[in-house]
Image (spheres, rainbow, N blue to C red):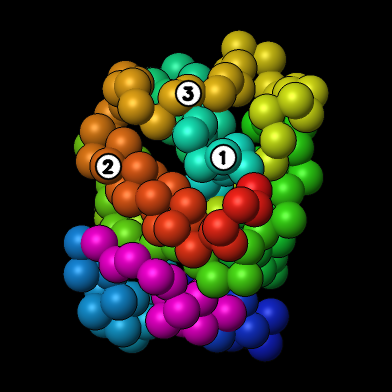
Amino acid sequence: MSRGDAGQMVLDEVVADARLAMLEFDGARAWLNEARQRPMEPLAVEVWVTDPAFEHVLLVKHRVRGWVPPGGKVEPGEGPRAAAVRECLEETGLRPTLLPEPVAVAVRSYRADWSPTLGLSYAAIVGRDVPLGGEQNQPPAWFCLDTDWQSIFPEDRERIRLHARRLAASRPIGGR
């Protein structure tokens, strides 16, 4: 990640969102503090899109990783929130309004031969009746949170379920 003025602004946004994230996995905040001392690998973002009933999650069929939340790499000079919206739009045809707080911060390798990457997970709520689009050969689909889906990151299933339960619990009684 570039250390110029634009790069520093993006890094500041990353650090702020990592601190705000409701969930932390893999010692991500400590990893980020250490990583800031050297050139950083690309930052990853994803969007956990749930329906208003918090019963389904929108996933994208990745050719290698299986079913995963829409997401990808933050481009140079791009903020993580803007990247999350862009990636979701590219992969699902949806331009989501992200919830105010990031859901999670984690560290993972997206390929066995890649260095660990910091990833920020954002959340959005979208009706299942909204038409989906996306990239060719990488279809998006809604999955019931009570079912399992094939993914290289099986721990994501329980993380996303936990997030959906938290959102459902915070919903006003009688409201959706």
Say if residue 91 shows up in the picture. Answer: yes
Q: Would residue 22 be counted in the magenta stretch?
A: yes
Q: Is tag 3's residue or tag 1's residue first in the polypeptide sequence?
A: 1
Label 3's element?
Answer: strand
| Residue that badge 2 annotates | 158
- Left or right: 165 in relation to 176: left
In magenta stretch: residue 40 = no
Q: Main secondary structure of the magenta part?
A: helix
Does residue 46 appear to the left or right of 77 in the view shown?
left
Q: CA distance from mark 3 to mark 2?
A: 13 Å
Label of residue 53 in the image: 1
Q: Is 176 or 102 nearer to us in this picture?
A: 176
Q: CA distance from mark 2 to mark 1?
A: 17 Å
Residue at (46, 79) in percent of width and height:
20
Label 1 near label 2: C-beta < 8 Å? no
- Which quadrant of the structure image shows residue 70? top right
Q: Callout 1 environment at 10 Å: few (<14), some (14 to 19), or many (20+)?
A: some
Label 2 vs 1, first from the N-terminus: 1
Which label sits on residue 143?
3
Residue 51 in the image: x percent, y percent? Answer: 60, 38
Q: Residue furthest front?
A: 174
Q: For the point 78% across and 29% down, which residue is it?
A: 130
Tag nearer the camera, 3 or 1: 1
Q: Which mark is residue 22?
A: none
Number of callouts: 3
Name the residue: 44% across, 24% down. 144
> Mark 1 falls on what kind of element?
loop
Q: Residues within 10 Å of mark 3 (few under 14, many from 20)?
A: some
Residue at horizontal 25%, vertical 62%? 25
What kind of residue is marked 3?
Answer: Phe
Place of residue 23 in the rendered image (x, y in percent of width and height, measured from the top left): 33, 66
| Residues in magenta, as a range | 13-25
